[in-house]
Structure formats: C-alpha cells, structure tokens
Image: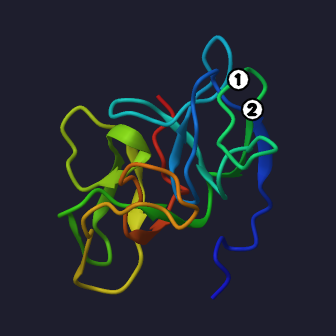
Amino acid sequence: MVAYSGTDPVSMVLKTGTTIKGPGKIIGVYDTSGVDIAQNNEIAIGISAADSTRDADGALQTSAGATVSVFPLGGVLQVQSKAGDSYNPGTLVYVDADGLATTTSSSRKLLGVYVGPAGVTGAALVVNGAGDSGASEGTMILVMTAGAATA
C-alpha cells in the first residue's frame, strides 16, 4: 500500500519553538509565526511526513524558520493515535492533544473516518527511532481525512 495515497507533501514553517518528532503528527492551523502541533478543539490542516528540520548536529531545530513537510488533508493518511483508543472500520477519528488522533469526540474537531483493519488499539507512546528524548510516538492508523472539520 502507498503510505499516503500518492499525495505530495508541502513544506510549512513551524511556530518558533515547535518541533515534530516524526511522521503522522496532526498539524494545526497557522498562528502568528507558523503552524503548530494540533491540540484538541483545533482544526487540522495536515499530517507530518517526517521530522521537522534539524541543525548541523542533528538536533531538532527550534529557532524561527524551522520547517516540516506536511501531507495536506483530503485522502487516506497514516496518523499517530493516542494510547488506549480502539478502532474498527467506520470509527470517527478526532484531533486530540499533542497532534495525536483519538476516538473521543467531546470538544474535539473531526479528523476523518478510520479505514484500517478491525480491532486496532493505540499502544503506549514510545521514543522515536532518531534518539530524541521523550515518549511521543503513537501507533499509526489509517484515516480517510476527506471529511475533516473546517470550522
């Protein structure tokens, strides 16, 4: 299967101080200085394709002008899930804190519909494979994002 439905990523400037530690993070709307990791009750505009930019020493860049490659919403995308949420085909998926997907709808914006295999449950967050600190990576799930909330 093609990982992101043949969609080409676009480069976006990150809000100063924001880092993205890998693919599958939900990206929220632009504010005063750039896009940010989406939080619950925020509209999503895309899904990260990879880590955000790094400096010459390999550390994630936090200064103004850092960028991230983002797949715009509209097709089937792989998104990181919050730990403990269970998915079956047709489950509605919402934007949760820290750029993760959730099945909880309260005060959250719709991201799309789960279209992966039945019985998938988000595992505990883990440290990414690039050696960055902090458990931040969730289970990747397939979400049809064509019906994402726009208001």
| Quadrant of residue 139 within the rendered picture | bottom left
Q: What's the residue type where badge 1 is placed?
A: Ser
On screen, residue 93 versus residue 106, left or right, reads: right
Which is in the foreground here, disc 1 or disc 2?
1
Q: Position of residue 26 (x, y in %)?
A: 50, 47
Q: Which residue is mark 2?
A: 66
Residue under the point 55% across and 56% down: 146
Residue under the point 29% across and 37% down: 108
Q: Position of residue 115 (x, y in %)?
A: 42, 76
Q: Residue furthest top?
A: 32
Residue 65 versus residue 4: which sits nearer the camera?
65
Tell me: residue 21, above or below residue 32. Answer: below
10 Å neighbourhood of mark 2: few (<14), some, or many (≥20)? many
Q: Secondary structure at mark 1?
A: loop
Q: What's the residue type where badge 2 is placed?
A: Ala
Residue under the point 64% across and 11% down: 32
Mark number displayed over residue 50? none
Q: Are marks 1 and 2 in contact (CB under 8 Å)?
A: yes
Which quadrant: the N terminus? bottom right
Q: Position of residue 6 (x, y in %)?
A: 76, 73
Residue 67 versus residue 55: which sits nearer the camera?
55
Residue 69 versus residue 127: which sits nearer the camera?
127
On screen, residue 27 versus residue 62, left or right, reads: left
On screen, residue 107 versus residue 126, left or right, reads: left
Q: Which residue is mark 1?
A: 63
